[in-house]
Image (cartoon, grey):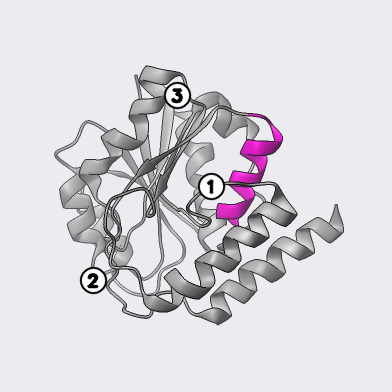
Amino acid sequence: MKIFVVIPAYNEEQRIGQVLKELSVLPYQVVVVDDASTDNTYNIVCSYKVDVLRHRVNRDQGAALASGNAYALSQGADIIVHFDADGQFLAKEIVDIIKPIISEGCDIVFGSRFLGKKSNLPFFKEKIIFPLARIFNKVFLGVSLSDPQSGFRAMTRATAQKIVIEQDGKAHCSEIMAKAYEYKLKIKEVPIRVIYHNEFGQGMSGALKILKDLLFSKILK
């Protein structure tokens, strides 16, 4: 079984080396999509035995994941895992993310910061952004998941072929969840721990941009 870990990266020279070092001892094929970084990210990534894709212009996280998915599928991936370059996720928890696919026949699995494991969530995200995001996902997208913006997920080959990421920015998280529900896929959440290096996390401006992108896409439909 071919398991590909797709990592979008933009100006992550400070932490991506450690992320790749931790992944290097695990039995996965790693694909890094350098989203036109202007720092030393690309050179650091090239020093590891991973596959590297590079955008000529910065297109944002959703677009990088779409590129990574397409590449992984072209290489025969059976399972695709989405993982961050900033060290927020734990490489050892990938096995927990893919287990429901292998043992329970799930189509897609989302990591959740709200199912038992303790994450050092920034107060603003935990008390304001996430509750509002859950309401939005439920009312406008029909999504009922404990973590409304999880970037740590795994999906089968068939799911990756079915869910085409159209949101270039951070709104891809909600988009993937909404399409998983729309296509009536077998979904599961598993507990994960997230380590925040920025005590404020993503601010209200980032949340508002996600909301704007999602609303705009619904209007166009």
Category of crowding for the residue at label 3, using alpha-carbon neighbours closer than 10 angstroms: few (below 14), some (14–19), many (at least 20): few
Report the residue marked by disc 1: 145
Report the residue marked by disc 2: 14
The secondary element bearing badge 1 is classed as loop
Q: Name the residue located 63 percent from the left edge and 47 percent from the top edge.
A: 143
Q: Name the residue located 49 percent from the left edge and 79 percent from the top edge.
A: 203
The span from disc 2 to disc 1 (Cα, nearest Å) is 32 Å
The span from disc 1 to disc 3 (Cα, nearest Å) is 30 Å
Category of crowding for the residue at label 1, using alpha-carbon neighbours closer than 10 angstroms: few (below 14), some (14–19), many (at least 20): some
Whether label 2 touches label 1, CB < 8 Å: no
Label 2 vs 1, first from the N-terminus: 2
> Would residue 49 be visible to someone looking at this image?
no
The disc labelled 1 sits on which kind of residue? Leu
Label 3 vs 2, first from the N-terminus: 2
The disc labelled 2 sits on which kind of residue? Gln
**Segment colored magenta:** 171-184
The secondary element bearing badge 3 is classed as loop
